[in-house]
Image (cartoon, rainbow, N blue to C red):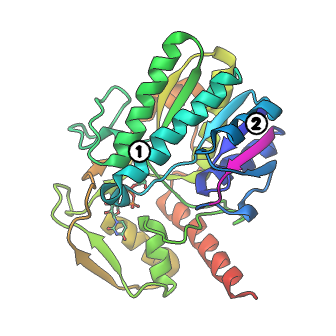
């Protein structure tokens, strides 16, 4: 299949591109390299471009004629979205509309969308399935929910079929450390903890210790990026075969608190890095844990890396490699 992948030079995108390439698909990565990297595109062709540039996007799509588009390009930091809402609505909503428009004008009908657990806000159920109402509490989650609304409406016209994958907390790296997370300003818990272990930061702050959770810190469902990449391949196959649109949660169904992640990171690295309790971070829901029954039953997805220590081990291997690379001239 011919697949156009926006944001394919980024963290999750690069893992999916790798998996698609290993299955023999023909890929164009469309990425502005704002947070992605040329070296992360291990398969297919990289087209450096911005989703804001509608005519470039149209031309690339017109020349390539993809069977499907997988859309990763987005801004993804919850806390930043609270400070810079316009950035999130522009990057995540307006630019996605540009993409959908370019698809429509080129009669590209199949779309895999990176949505997020952040669409749920502060749910009152412990395990979240797709029927839980969407009440995002930050602009990031709201931007993802808005696009889901657009997709739902477009589907009704018969011009588009899509699968929205709602990611929970994606972490870890390719076990061979060929690609991994490499943002300039890492804010995610596991990456931040490992960079603290490496000495890049003096301490790791625990944002909020007074949440209504057993140890007072936020609980998240950490999913290994390779399992998530595999979910994309299965979702794409399902979409192409059945032509049915759907929404699926991607997580393991098990939550870990910030303190539990810190303990696991200390154990894996063998480094007792400094941790400090700090006030809550804006926009953080106390608990997000997936019920991924739908993904499993519909696509046959079976996670292979449902193990927090394995997730952290692969992330650690990647961090050590990144550090080594930076030391090289
Ligand atoms: N945290 C800390 N210290 C840090 C970093 C994070 O205590 O230095 C805490 C956060 O406050 C939060 C938890 O660790 O409670 C996880 O935070 P992350 O920044 O790792 O991830 P988020 O849950 O904020 O968001 C991530 C993605 C979103 C996605 C969401 C889904 O960035 O895109 O998971 O659950 F929507």
Left or right: where does residue 98 sit relative to residue 44? left
Q: CA distance from mark 2 to mark 1?
A: 24 Å
Residue bounds of the magenta highlight: 26-33
Q: Badge 2 is on which residue?
A: 59
Determine the main secondary structure of the stretch shown in magenta.
strand
The one nearer the camera, 30 or 289, is 30
The one nearer the camera, 286 or 215, is 286
Secondary-structure class at tag 1 = helix
Q: Residues within 10 Å of mark 2 (few under 14, many from 20)?
A: few
Q: Regarding ligand 1, which quadrant of the image does it lie in?
A: bottom left
Find residue 273 and report its image quarter: bottom left
- Whether residue 98 is situated above or below residue 192 in the rendered picture: above
Picture coordinates of residue 204, whole percent (x, y): 36, 78
Name which residue lies at 49% across and 25% down: 151
- Whether residue 82 is situated above or below residue 3 in the rendered picture: below
Q: Which mark is residue 121?
A: none
- Whether residue 196 is situated above or below residue 309 in the rendered picture: below
Instruction: Point out the frontmost of discs 2 and 1.
Output: 2
Q: How many marks?
A: 2
Q: Which mark is residue 89?
A: 1
């Amino acid at each position: 299949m011919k697949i156009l992948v926006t944001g394919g030079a980024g963290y999750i995108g690069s893992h999916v591109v790798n998996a698609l390439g290993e299955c023999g698909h023909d890929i164009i990565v469309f990425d502005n390299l704002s947070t992605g990297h040329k070296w992360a595109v291990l398969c297919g062709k990289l087209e450096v471009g911005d989703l804001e540039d509608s005519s470039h996007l149209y031309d690339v799509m017109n020349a390539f004629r993809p069977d499907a588009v997988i859309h990763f390009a987005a801004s993804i930091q919850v806390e930043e979205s609270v400070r810079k809402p316009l950035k999130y609505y522009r990057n995540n909503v307006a630019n996605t509309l540009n993409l959908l428009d370019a698809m429509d004008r080129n009669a590209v009908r199949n779309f895999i969308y990176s949505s997020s657990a952040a669409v749920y806000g502060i749910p009152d159920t412990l395990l979240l399935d797709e029927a839980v109402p969407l009440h995002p509490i930050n602009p990031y989650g709201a931007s993802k929910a808005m696009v889901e609304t657009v997709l739902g409406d477009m589907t009704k016209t018969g011009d588009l079929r899509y699968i929205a994958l709602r990611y929970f907390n994606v972490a870890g790296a390719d076990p061979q450390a060929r690609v991994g997370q490499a943002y300039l300003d890492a804010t995610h818990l596991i990456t931040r903890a490992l960079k603290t272990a490496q000495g890049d930061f003096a301490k790791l702050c625990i944002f909020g210790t007074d949440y209504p959770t057993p140890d007072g810190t936020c609980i998240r469902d950490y999913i290994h990026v390779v399992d998530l990449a595999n979910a994309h391949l299965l979702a794409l196959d399902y979409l192409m075969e059945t032509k049915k649109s759907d929404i699926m949660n991607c997580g393991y169904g098990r939550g870990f608190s910030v303190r539990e992640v810190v303990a696991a990171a200390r154990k894996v690295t063998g480094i007792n890095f400094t941790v400090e309790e700090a006030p809550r971070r804006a926009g953080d829901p106390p608990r997000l844990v997936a019920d991924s029954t739908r993904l499993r039953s519909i696509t046959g997805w079976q996670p292979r890396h449902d193990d927090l220590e394995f997730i952290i081990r692969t992330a650690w291997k990647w961090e050590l490699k990144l550090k080594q690379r930076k030391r090289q001239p």
